[in-house]
Protein backbone atom coordinates (compact mmCIF):
# COMPACT_ATOMS: atom_id res chain seq x y z
CA UNK A 1 0.00 0.00 0.00
CA UNK A 2 2.55 2.57 1.03
CA UNK A 3 4.87 3.71 -1.70
CA UNK A 4 8.59 3.89 -0.91
CA UNK A 5 10.53 7.16 -1.21
CA UNK A 6 12.33 5.72 -4.21
CA UNK A 7 9.04 5.05 -6.02
CA UNK A 8 7.72 8.49 -5.10
CA UNK A 9 10.83 10.11 -6.51
CA UNK A 10 10.37 8.18 -9.72
CA UNK A 11 6.67 9.11 -9.92
CA UNK A 12 7.20 12.84 -9.44
CA UNK A 13 9.94 12.90 -12.06
CA UNK A 14 7.82 11.12 -14.64
CA UNK A 15 7.55 13.34 -17.73
CA UNK A 16 3.77 12.77 -17.70
CA UNK A 17 3.43 14.21 -14.20
CA UNK A 18 1.05 17.23 -14.29
CA UNK A 19 2.77 20.61 -14.32
CA UNK A 20 1.53 24.10 -13.48
CA UNK A 21 0.18 24.45 -17.04
CA UNK A 22 -2.02 21.38 -16.51
CA UNK A 23 -3.30 22.71 -13.21
CA UNK A 24 -4.25 26.15 -14.49
CA UNK A 25 -5.78 24.78 -17.69
CA UNK A 26 -7.77 22.04 -15.99
CA UNK A 27 -8.83 23.70 -12.76
CA UNK A 28 -9.41 27.30 -13.81
CA UNK A 29 -11.63 29.10 -16.24
CA UNK A 30 -10.25 32.10 -18.10
CA UNK A 31 -6.65 31.83 -16.88
CA UNK A 32 -4.60 34.86 -17.88
CA UNK A 33 -0.87 34.52 -17.36
CA UNK A 34 0.88 37.71 -16.27
CA UNK A 35 4.56 38.38 -16.73
CA UNK A 36 7.51 40.21 -15.26
CA UNK A 37 8.79 41.52 -11.95
CA UNK A 38 8.80 45.20 -13.09
CA UNK A 39 12.47 45.52 -12.07
CA UNK A 40 14.54 43.32 -14.26
CA UNK A 41 12.93 40.54 -16.30
CA UNK A 42 10.30 37.88 -16.66
CA UNK A 43 11.38 34.57 -15.20
CA UNK A 44 9.96 31.61 -17.11
CA UNK A 45 10.57 29.33 -14.12
CA UNK A 46 7.62 30.96 -12.37
CA UNK A 47 4.15 30.93 -13.91
CA UNK A 48 1.67 33.35 -12.40
CA UNK A 49 -1.67 34.79 -13.32
CA UNK A 50 -5.35 35.12 -12.53
CA UNK A 51 -8.39 33.02 -13.32
CA UNK A 52 -11.53 31.69 -11.70
CA UNK A 53 -11.88 28.49 -9.72
CA UNK A 54 -15.52 27.41 -9.74
CA UNK A 55 -16.43 31.05 -10.20
CA UNK A 56 -14.08 32.42 -7.53
CA UNK A 57 -11.37 34.77 -8.84
CA UNK A 58 -7.96 33.51 -7.69
CA UNK A 59 -4.30 34.29 -8.28
CA UNK A 60 -2.19 31.24 -9.05
CA UNK A 61 1.60 31.27 -8.69
CA UNK A 62 3.79 28.26 -9.24
CA UNK A 63 7.06 26.80 -10.39
CA UNK A 64 7.01 25.85 -14.04
CA UNK A 65 8.49 22.66 -15.38
CA UNK A 66 8.28 21.43 -18.93
CA UNK A 67 7.34 18.03 -20.24
CA UNK A 68 9.98 17.97 -22.91
CA UNK A 69 13.66 18.83 -22.84
CA UNK A 70 13.00 22.08 -24.71
CA UNK A 71 10.18 22.94 -22.33
CA UNK A 72 12.38 22.26 -19.36
CA UNK A 73 15.26 24.25 -20.76
CA UNK A 74 12.94 27.20 -21.39
CA UNK A 75 11.63 27.02 -17.82
CA UNK A 76 15.10 26.37 -16.36
CA UNK A 77 13.77 23.08 -14.91
CA UNK A 78 11.59 24.99 -12.48
CA UNK A 79 14.51 26.70 -10.78
CA UNK A 80 13.68 30.40 -10.39
CA UNK A 81 15.99 33.38 -10.41
CA UNK A 82 15.37 36.31 -8.03
CA UNK A 83 13.12 38.00 -10.60
CA UNK A 84 10.85 34.95 -10.45
CA UNK A 85 10.32 35.39 -6.72
CA UNK A 86 9.84 39.13 -7.21
CA UNK A 87 7.19 38.47 -9.86
CA UNK A 88 5.49 36.06 -7.46
CA UNK A 89 5.48 38.66 -4.72
CA UNK A 90 4.22 41.39 -7.05
CA UNK A 91 1.25 39.27 -8.04
CA UNK A 92 0.63 38.17 -4.46
CA UNK A 93 0.34 41.83 -3.47
CA UNK A 94 -1.95 42.40 -6.43
CA UNK A 95 -4.17 39.55 -5.17
CA UNK A 96 -4.15 41.17 -1.73
CA UNK A 97 -5.29 44.48 -3.22
CA UNK A 98 -8.22 42.89 -5.04
CA UNK A 99 -9.09 40.44 -2.27
CA UNK A 100 -8.31 37.32 -4.29
CA UNK A 101 -7.09 34.14 -2.57
CA UNK A 102 -3.60 33.04 -3.64
CA UNK A 103 -2.91 29.46 -4.70
CA UNK A 104 0.73 28.40 -4.90
CA UNK A 105 1.78 25.32 -6.82
CA UNK A 106 5.16 24.15 -5.51
CA UNK A 107 7.34 21.97 -7.71
CA UNK A 108 11.03 22.86 -7.86
CA UNK A 109 14.40 21.24 -7.27
CA UNK A 110 15.32 24.56 -5.62
CA UNK A 111 16.10 28.18 -6.38
CA UNK A 112 18.67 28.50 -9.16
CA UNK A 113 22.33 28.56 -8.18
CA UNK A 114 24.25 30.74 -10.63
CA UNK A 115 26.10 34.00 -11.17
CA UNK A 116 23.09 36.10 -12.19
CA UNK A 117 21.05 34.74 -9.29
CA UNK A 118 23.74 35.87 -6.84
CA UNK A 119 24.25 39.23 -8.54
CA UNK A 120 20.55 40.01 -8.32
CA UNK A 121 20.13 38.82 -4.74
CA UNK A 122 18.62 35.34 -4.63
CA UNK A 123 18.87 35.39 -0.85
CA UNK A 124 17.15 38.76 -0.54
CA UNK A 125 14.37 37.75 -2.94
CA UNK A 126 13.55 34.60 -0.98
CA UNK A 127 13.84 36.35 2.39
CA UNK A 128 11.44 39.07 1.32
CA UNK A 129 9.03 36.49 0.01
CA UNK A 130 8.99 34.71 3.39
CA UNK A 131 8.42 37.90 5.37
CA UNK A 132 5.77 39.32 3.05
CA UNK A 133 3.73 36.17 2.40
CA UNK A 134 3.54 35.85 6.19
CA UNK A 135 1.71 39.18 6.33
CA UNK A 136 -0.27 39.00 3.10
CA UNK A 137 -3.81 40.07 3.89
CA UNK A 138 -5.61 37.46 1.83
CA UNK A 139 -5.89 33.67 2.17
CA UNK A 140 -2.92 31.69 0.82
CA UNK A 141 -2.96 27.97 0.04
CA UNK A 142 0.14 26.11 -1.12
CA UNK A 143 0.16 22.67 -2.65
CA UNK A 144 3.40 20.78 -3.02
CA UNK A 145 2.67 18.80 -6.16
CA UNK A 146 6.08 17.31 -6.94
CA UNK A 147 9.44 18.37 -5.55
CA UNK A 148 9.48 20.82 -2.68
CA UNK A 149 13.16 21.73 -2.88
CA UNK A 150 14.49 23.78 0.01
CA UNK A 151 14.28 27.59 0.26
CA UNK A 152 13.22 27.84 -3.37
CA UNK A 153 10.07 25.90 -2.47
CA UNK A 154 9.53 27.53 0.92
CA UNK A 155 9.36 30.96 -0.74
CA UNK A 156 5.99 29.84 -2.16
CA UNK A 157 4.92 27.80 0.86
CA UNK A 158 4.35 30.37 3.60
CA UNK A 159 0.60 29.83 3.60
CA UNK A 160 -2.50 29.35 5.73
CA UNK A 161 -2.75 25.83 4.40
CA UNK A 162 0.16 23.78 3.11
CA UNK A 163 -1.07 20.63 1.39
CA UNK A 164 0.88 17.89 -0.34
CA UNK A 165 -0.03 15.42 -3.04
CA UNK A 166 0.46 11.88 -1.77
CA UNK A 167 3.62 11.30 -3.81
CA UNK A 168 5.15 14.73 -3.34
CA UNK A 169 8.31 15.32 -1.33
CA UNK A 170 9.38 18.42 0.59
CA UNK A 171 12.91 18.69 1.87
CA UNK A 172 15.51 21.04 3.32
CA UNK A 173 18.13 19.72 0.90
CA UNK A 174 18.03 17.41 -2.09
CA UNK A 175 18.74 13.84 -1.00
CA UNK A 176 21.65 13.86 -3.44
CA UNK A 177 23.12 16.99 -1.88
CA UNK A 178 22.68 15.56 1.60
CA UNK A 179 24.46 12.32 0.67
CA UNK A 180 27.37 14.13 -0.92
CA UNK A 181 27.86 16.44 2.07
CA UNK A 182 27.37 13.80 4.73
CA UNK A 183 29.11 10.81 3.20
CA UNK A 184 30.91 12.44 0.24
CA UNK A 185 28.96 10.00 -1.89
CA UNK A 186 26.05 11.25 -3.99
CA UNK A 187 25.13 7.72 -4.99
CA UNK A 188 23.74 7.12 -1.50
CA UNK A 189 20.85 9.41 -2.48
CA UNK A 190 18.05 7.01 -1.55
CA UNK A 191 19.51 6.32 1.85
CA UNK A 192 19.61 10.07 2.49
CA UNK A 193 16.05 10.44 1.20
CA UNK A 194 14.88 7.95 3.80
CA UNK A 195 16.83 9.56 6.63
CA UNK A 196 15.58 13.05 5.81
CA UNK A 197 11.88 12.09 6.20
CA UNK A 198 10.60 14.00 3.19
CA UNK A 199 7.33 12.29 2.22
CA UNK A 200 3.85 13.73 2.69
CA UNK A 201 3.17 11.14 5.39
CA UNK A 202 6.31 12.17 7.29
CA UNK A 203 5.45 15.86 7.15
CA UNK A 204 1.84 15.29 8.18
CA UNK A 205 3.11 13.29 11.16
CA UNK A 206 5.43 16.20 12.06
CA UNK A 207 2.49 18.59 11.91
CA UNK A 208 4.13 20.89 9.37
CA UNK A 209 1.50 20.37 6.65
CA UNK A 210 -2.27 20.39 7.03
CA UNK A 211 -3.30 17.49 4.85
CA UNK A 212 -2.47 15.07 2.06
CA UNK A 213 -4.37 14.98 -1.22
CA UNK A 214 -4.90 11.50 -2.65
CA UNK A 215 -3.88 11.23 -6.26
CA UNK A 216 -6.30 8.46 -7.20
CA UNK A 217 -5.87 6.26 -10.23
CA UNK A 218 -5.20 8.83 -12.93
CA UNK A 219 -4.64 12.50 -13.72
CA UNK A 220 -8.39 13.17 -13.86
CA UNK A 221 -8.91 11.94 -10.32
CA UNK A 222 -5.83 13.85 -9.15
CA UNK A 223 -7.25 17.06 -10.60
CA UNK A 224 -10.68 16.42 -9.10
CA UNK A 225 -9.17 15.90 -5.66
CA UNK A 226 -6.99 18.99 -5.92
CA UNK A 227 -9.99 21.08 -6.95
CA UNK A 228 -12.08 19.78 -4.06
CA UNK A 229 -9.30 20.45 -1.55
CA UNK A 230 -8.80 23.98 -2.87
CA UNK A 231 -12.49 24.85 -2.77
CA UNK A 232 -13.00 23.47 0.73
CA UNK A 233 -10.05 25.41 2.08
CA UNK A 234 -10.78 28.64 0.24
CA UNK A 235 -14.36 28.72 1.47
CA UNK A 236 -13.23 28.11 5.02
CA UNK A 237 -10.39 30.64 4.95
CA UNK A 238 -12.50 33.37 3.32
CA UNK A 239 -14.78 33.35 6.34
CA UNK A 240 -11.93 34.10 8.77
CA UNK A 241 -11.46 37.77 9.65
CA UNK A 242 -8.10 38.82 8.17
CA UNK A 243 -6.50 39.67 11.53
CA UNK A 244 -7.40 36.22 12.84
CA UNK A 245 -6.15 34.62 9.62
CA UNK A 246 -2.77 36.37 9.93
CA UNK A 247 -2.47 35.60 13.61
CA UNK A 248 -3.10 31.91 12.95
CA UNK A 249 -0.65 31.90 10.06
CA UNK A 250 2.03 33.35 12.34
CA UNK A 251 1.31 30.87 15.12
CA UNK A 252 1.38 27.95 12.71
CA UNK A 253 4.99 28.68 11.69
CA UNK A 254 5.93 29.99 15.13
CA UNK A 255 5.45 26.62 16.78
CA UNK A 256 7.65 24.64 14.35
CA UNK A 257 10.85 23.30 15.89
CA UNK A 258 11.96 20.54 18.24
CA UNK A 259 14.30 21.30 21.15
CA UNK A 260 14.69 20.82 24.89
CA UNK A 261 14.64 23.43 27.62
CA UNK A 262 16.93 22.44 30.46
CA UNK B 1 42.90 31.48 -0.50
CA UNK B 2 39.56 32.49 0.79
CA UNK B 3 37.94 29.58 -1.00
CA UNK B 4 39.86 27.10 1.08
CA UNK B 5 38.57 28.60 4.28
CA UNK B 6 34.97 28.34 3.27
CA UNK B 7 34.17 24.79 4.30
CA UNK B 8 36.30 24.68 7.44
CA UNK B 9 34.17 23.64 10.34
CA UNK B 10 36.69 22.97 13.06
CA UNK B 11 39.26 25.71 13.18
CA UNK B 12 39.02 29.40 13.00
CA UNK B 13 40.86 30.94 10.10
CA UNK B 14 44.00 30.99 12.18
CA UNK B 15 45.62 27.81 13.37
CA UNK B 16 47.58 27.18 16.53
CA UNK B 17 51.23 26.41 15.92
CA UNK B 18 51.86 23.05 17.47
CA UNK B 19 55.46 23.04 18.64
CA UNK B 20 55.78 26.14 20.79
CA UNK B 21 56.88 25.14 24.29
CA UNK B 22 57.98 28.14 26.33
CA UNK B 23 55.41 30.83 25.55
CA UNK B 24 52.19 30.77 27.60
CA UNK B 25 50.11 31.36 24.48
CA UNK B 26 51.37 29.64 21.33
CA UNK B 27 52.11 31.66 18.24
CA UNK B 28 49.59 31.75 15.45
CA UNK B 29 50.22 31.31 11.76
CA UNK B 30 48.01 33.20 9.33
CA UNK B 31 46.41 30.67 7.04
CA UNK B 32 46.49 32.94 4.06
CA UNK B 33 49.90 34.64 4.13
CA UNK B 34 51.76 32.39 6.58
CA UNK B 35 52.91 35.23 8.83
CA UNK B 36 53.68 34.02 12.35
CA UNK B 37 51.97 36.20 14.94
CA UNK B 38 52.13 36.42 18.70
CA UNK B 39 48.75 35.48 20.12
CA UNK B 40 48.55 38.64 22.23
CA UNK B 41 49.34 40.89 19.30
CA UNK B 42 46.81 39.08 17.16
CA UNK B 43 44.13 39.56 19.81
CA UNK B 44 45.07 43.21 20.18
CA UNK B 45 44.62 43.57 16.43
CA UNK B 46 41.07 42.19 16.82
CA UNK B 47 42.03 38.88 15.19
CA UNK B 48 42.87 40.52 11.89
CA UNK B 49 46.20 39.52 10.35
CA UNK B 50 48.31 42.73 10.35
CA UNK B 51 50.23 41.47 7.36
CA UNK B 52 47.56 40.45 4.84
CA UNK B 53 44.38 41.73 6.46
CA UNK B 54 42.63 38.36 6.72
CA UNK B 55 39.72 38.52 9.17
CA UNK B 56 39.75 35.62 11.63
CA UNK B 57 36.39 34.08 12.40
CA UNK B 58 35.44 35.01 15.94
CA UNK B 59 33.92 32.98 18.71
CA UNK B 60 30.56 34.44 19.74
CA UNK B 61 31.91 35.30 23.20
CA UNK B 62 34.83 37.22 21.65
CA UNK B 63 32.50 39.07 19.31
CA UNK B 64 30.26 40.05 22.20
CA UNK B 65 33.24 41.28 24.22
CA UNK B 66 34.38 43.43 21.29
CA UNK B 67 30.92 44.86 20.64
CA UNK B 68 28.95 45.52 23.81
CA UNK B 69 29.62 47.86 26.74
CA UNK B 70 31.76 46.20 29.41
CA UNK B 71 29.86 43.70 31.57
CA UNK B 72 26.53 44.69 30.04
CA UNK B 73 25.69 41.40 28.32
CA UNK B 74 23.02 39.21 29.84
CA UNK B 75 22.46 35.95 28.04
CA UNK B 76 18.85 34.89 27.38
CA UNK B 77 17.51 31.48 26.37
CA UNK B 78 20.89 29.84 26.90
CA UNK B 79 19.01 26.87 28.31
CA UNK B 80 17.72 25.71 24.92
CA UNK B 81 19.28 22.47 23.84
CA UNK B 82 19.31 20.56 20.58
CA UNK B 83 16.98 17.60 20.14
CA UNK B 84 17.10 14.99 17.40
CA UNK B 85 13.67 15.13 15.75
CA UNK B 86 14.50 12.78 12.86
CA UNK B 87 16.58 10.41 15.00
CA UNK B 88 19.38 11.22 12.60
CA UNK B 89 22.22 8.80 13.22
CA UNK B 90 25.24 10.37 14.88
CA UNK B 91 23.65 13.79 15.37
CA UNK B 92 23.54 13.71 19.17
CA UNK B 93 27.17 12.64 19.41
CA UNK B 94 28.18 15.35 17.01
CA UNK B 95 26.42 18.01 19.08
CA UNK B 96 27.94 16.72 22.32
CA UNK B 97 31.45 16.76 20.87
CA UNK B 98 30.95 20.30 19.59
CA UNK B 99 29.60 21.46 22.93
CA UNK B 100 32.72 20.20 24.69
CA UNK B 101 35.02 21.63 22.08
CA UNK B 102 33.46 25.08 21.79
CA UNK B 103 32.08 25.44 25.32
CA UNK B 104 28.83 26.58 23.72
CA UNK B 105 25.46 24.88 23.79
CA UNK B 106 24.43 25.85 20.26
CA UNK B 107 25.46 27.94 17.28
CA UNK B 108 23.94 31.25 18.34
CA UNK B 109 24.24 33.28 21.53
CA UNK B 110 21.35 35.65 22.28
CA UNK B 111 20.69 38.21 24.95
CA UNK B 112 20.44 41.86 25.89
CA UNK B 113 23.24 44.35 26.36
CA UNK B 114 24.01 48.01 26.04
CA UNK B 115 26.00 49.42 23.14
CA UNK B 116 27.09 52.98 23.73
CA UNK B 117 24.68 53.00 26.66
CA UNK B 118 21.70 52.01 24.50
CA UNK B 119 19.83 48.90 25.54
CA UNK B 120 19.88 46.48 22.60
CA UNK B 121 18.94 42.88 21.84
CA UNK B 122 21.88 41.04 20.35
CA UNK B 123 22.35 37.71 18.61
CA UNK B 124 25.73 36.36 17.55
CA UNK B 125 26.15 33.28 15.38
CA UNK B 126 29.32 31.24 15.75
CA UNK B 127 30.66 29.31 12.79
CA UNK B 128 32.80 27.12 15.04
CA UNK B 129 29.62 25.27 15.99
CA UNK B 130 28.65 23.03 13.06
CA UNK B 131 29.19 25.94 10.67
CA UNK B 132 26.45 27.85 12.53
CA UNK B 133 23.89 25.92 10.58
CA UNK B 134 20.31 26.75 11.52
CA UNK B 135 18.37 24.08 13.35
CA UNK B 136 15.45 24.41 15.73
CA UNK B 137 17.47 25.91 18.58
CA UNK B 138 19.07 28.62 16.43
CA UNK B 139 15.67 29.45 14.91
CA UNK B 140 13.89 29.47 18.26
CA UNK B 141 16.46 31.65 20.03
CA UNK B 142 16.44 34.24 17.26
CA UNK B 143 12.64 34.20 17.09
CA UNK B 144 12.46 34.80 20.84
CA UNK B 145 15.02 37.57 20.48
CA UNK B 146 12.90 39.44 17.92
CA UNK B 147 9.64 38.84 19.80
CA UNK B 148 11.28 40.11 22.99
CA UNK B 149 12.72 43.13 21.16
CA UNK B 150 9.28 43.90 19.71
CA UNK B 151 7.55 43.62 23.09
CA UNK B 152 10.19 45.71 24.90
CA UNK B 153 10.58 48.26 22.08
CA UNK B 154 14.28 47.53 21.74
CA UNK B 155 16.53 47.59 18.68
CA UNK B 156 18.06 44.30 17.56
CA UNK B 157 21.55 43.64 16.23
CA UNK B 158 22.40 40.24 14.75
CA UNK B 159 25.88 39.15 13.65
CA UNK B 160 25.22 36.47 11.06
CA UNK B 161 27.45 33.58 10.04
CA UNK B 162 26.16 30.32 8.70
CA UNK B 163 26.68 27.50 6.28
CA UNK B 164 22.89 27.36 5.86
CA UNK B 165 20.34 24.84 7.01
CA UNK B 166 21.01 22.08 9.58
CA UNK B 167 20.16 19.13 7.38
CA UNK B 168 20.17 16.72 10.34
CA UNK B 169 16.90 18.37 11.40
CA UNK B 170 15.30 18.09 7.96
CA UNK B 171 12.11 20.06 7.38
CA UNK B 172 12.25 21.54 10.89
CA UNK B 173 15.45 23.26 9.89
CA UNK B 174 13.99 24.63 6.64
CA UNK B 175 10.95 26.08 8.37
CA UNK B 176 13.10 28.06 10.82
CA UNK B 177 13.70 30.43 7.90
CA UNK B 178 9.99 31.27 7.80
CA UNK B 179 9.69 31.39 11.58
CA UNK B 180 12.55 33.83 12.16
CA UNK B 181 11.56 35.98 9.16
CA UNK B 182 8.05 36.25 10.58
CA UNK B 183 9.42 37.43 13.92
CA UNK B 184 11.67 39.96 12.16
CA UNK B 185 8.59 41.30 10.34
CA UNK B 186 6.71 41.51 13.64
CA UNK B 187 9.54 43.51 15.21
CA UNK B 188 9.65 45.74 12.15
CA UNK B 189 5.91 46.39 12.23
CA UNK B 190 6.29 47.42 15.87
CA UNK B 191 8.74 50.08 14.67
CA UNK B 192 11.87 48.32 15.86
CA UNK B 193 15.29 48.91 14.32
CA UNK B 194 17.10 45.81 13.11
CA UNK B 195 20.75 45.99 12.12
CA UNK B 196 22.29 42.96 10.44
CA UNK B 197 26.05 42.48 10.45
CA UNK B 198 27.09 39.93 7.84
CA UNK B 199 30.28 38.12 8.79
CA UNK B 200 32.29 35.40 7.14
CA UNK B 201 30.64 33.17 5.95
CA UNK B 202 26.92 33.95 5.63
CA UNK B 203 25.23 31.63 3.15
CA UNK B 204 22.23 29.49 2.31
CA UNK B 205 19.06 29.63 4.35
CA UNK B 206 20.36 32.35 6.65
CA UNK B 207 21.12 34.65 3.70
CA UNK B 208 17.68 33.73 2.32
CA UNK B 209 15.93 34.79 5.53
CA UNK B 210 16.78 37.10 8.44
CA UNK B 211 20.28 38.07 7.24
CA UNK B 212 18.73 39.90 4.27
CA UNK B 213 15.93 41.58 6.21
CA UNK B 214 17.77 44.21 8.26
CA UNK B 215 16.72 47.85 8.10
CA UNK B 216 20.44 48.43 7.83
CA UNK B 217 22.78 45.74 6.55
CA UNK B 218 26.46 46.01 7.45
CA UNK B 219 29.21 43.59 6.53
CA UNK B 220 32.79 42.87 7.53
CA UNK B 221 35.37 43.41 4.78
CA UNK B 222 35.97 40.47 2.44
CA UNK B 223 33.35 38.27 4.18
CA UNK B 224 31.88 35.57 1.96
CA UNK B 225 28.15 36.20 1.63
CA UNK B 226 25.81 34.46 -0.78
CA UNK B 227 22.94 32.11 -1.32
CA UNK B 228 24.46 29.15 -3.12
CA UNK B 229 27.82 27.61 -2.31
CA UNK B 230 30.64 28.68 -4.54
CA UNK B 231 31.46 25.13 -5.58
CA UNK B 232 27.82 24.43 -6.45
CA UNK B 233 27.80 27.38 -8.84
CA UNK B 234 31.16 26.43 -10.31
CA UNK B 235 29.76 22.94 -10.84
CA UNK B 236 26.70 24.38 -12.61
CA UNK B 237 28.54 26.71 -14.95
CA UNK B 238 31.68 24.64 -15.35
CA UNK B 239 34.17 27.43 -14.74
CA UNK B 240 36.08 29.00 -11.88
CA UNK B 241 34.57 32.11 -10.35
CA UNK B 242 36.59 35.26 -9.68
CA UNK B 243 37.91 35.57 -6.13
CA UNK B 244 35.74 38.54 -5.17
CA UNK B 245 32.52 36.75 -6.20
CA UNK B 246 30.12 36.69 -3.21
CA UNK B 247 32.39 38.94 -1.15
CA UNK B 248 31.02 41.75 1.00
CA UNK B 249 32.35 44.16 -1.63
CA UNK B 250 30.52 42.25 -4.39
CA UNK B 251 27.34 42.44 -2.34
CA UNK B 252 27.68 46.16 -1.78
CA UNK B 253 28.35 46.91 -5.42
CA UNK B 254 25.24 44.94 -6.39
CA UNK B 255 23.10 46.85 -3.95
CA UNK B 256 22.52 44.33 -1.18
CA UNK B 257 24.62 45.79 1.64
CA UNK B 258 24.52 49.30 3.10
CA UNK B 259 28.05 49.61 4.38
CA UNK B 260 31.24 47.63 4.84
CA UNK B 261 32.66 48.31 8.28
CA UNK B 262 36.18 47.33 9.40
CA UNK B 263 36.26 45.42 12.65
CA UNK B 264 37.97 48.21 14.58
CA UNK B 265 35.13 50.59 13.69
CA UNK B 266 32.20 48.22 14.21
CA UNK B 267 31.33 49.18 17.78
CA UNK B 268 31.51 52.88 17.01
CA UNK B 269 29.36 52.46 13.88
CA UNK B 270 26.72 50.48 15.75
CA UNK B 271 26.67 53.07 18.52
CA UNK B 272 26.15 55.85 16.00
CA UNK B 273 23.36 54.05 14.15
CA UNK B 274 21.61 53.07 17.37
CA UNK B 275 21.87 56.65 18.65
CA UNK B 276 20.36 57.99 15.42
CA UNK B 277 17.28 55.87 16.08
CA UNK B 278 16.82 56.96 19.69
CA UNK B 279 13.81 59.14 20.35
CA UNK B 280 15.12 62.44 21.72
CA UNK B 281 14.60 62.96 25.43
CA UNK B 282 12.89 66.31 25.77
CA UNK B 283 12.08 66.78 29.47
CA UNK B 284 15.66 67.06 30.79
CA UNK B 285 16.56 69.95 28.54
CA UNK B 286 13.47 71.89 29.50
CA UNK B 287 14.24 71.45 33.17
CA UNK B 288 17.75 72.83 32.66
CA UNK B 289 16.47 75.89 30.84
CA UNK B 290 13.96 76.61 33.55
Image (cartoon, coloured by chain):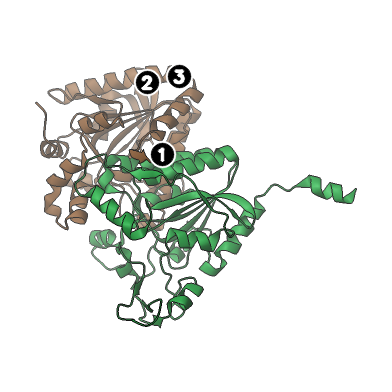
Chain colours: A brown, B green
Question: Quarter of the image holding residue B117?
Answer: bottom right
Q: Mark 3 points at which residue?
A: A240
Residue at x 43%, y 44% (from the top left corner)? B141
Quadrant for the N terminus of chain A in the image: top left
The chain carrying label 1 is B
Dot 2 falls on a residue whose secondary structure is helix
Q: Name the residue under label 1.
A: B179
In front: label 1 or label 2: 1
Q: Name the residue under label 2.
A: A234
Q: Which circle marks residue B60 in the picture?
A: none
Query: In this orientation, which residue lies closer to the viewer: A60 or B267?
Result: B267
Residue at x 20%, y 32% (from the top left corner)? A18
The answer to whether one can see residue B99 in this image is yes
Neighbours of disc 1 within 10 Å: few (<14), some (14-19), many (20+): many
Tell me, yes or no, whether dots 2 and 3 are on the same chain: yes
Marks 1 and 3 sit apart, C-alpha to C-alpha, by 22 Å
Q: With A226 as the anchor, is A43 left or right in this view?
A: right
Amino acid sequence: MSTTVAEKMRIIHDPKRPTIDDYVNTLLDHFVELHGDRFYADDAAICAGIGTLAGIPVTVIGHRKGKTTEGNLAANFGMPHPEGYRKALRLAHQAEKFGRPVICIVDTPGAFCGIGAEERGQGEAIARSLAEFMNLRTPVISIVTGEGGSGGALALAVADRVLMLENAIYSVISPRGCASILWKDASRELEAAERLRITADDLLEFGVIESIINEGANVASLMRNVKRALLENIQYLQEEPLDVLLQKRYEKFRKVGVFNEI
Amino acid sequence: MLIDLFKKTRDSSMQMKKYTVSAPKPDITCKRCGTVLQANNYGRNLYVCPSCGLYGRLFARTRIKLTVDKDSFQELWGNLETANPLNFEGYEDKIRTLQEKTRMREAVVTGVCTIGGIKTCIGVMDSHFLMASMGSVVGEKLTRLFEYAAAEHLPAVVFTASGGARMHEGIFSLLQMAKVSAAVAKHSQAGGLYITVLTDPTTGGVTASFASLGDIILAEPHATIGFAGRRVIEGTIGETLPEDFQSAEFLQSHGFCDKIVPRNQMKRTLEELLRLHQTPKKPKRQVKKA
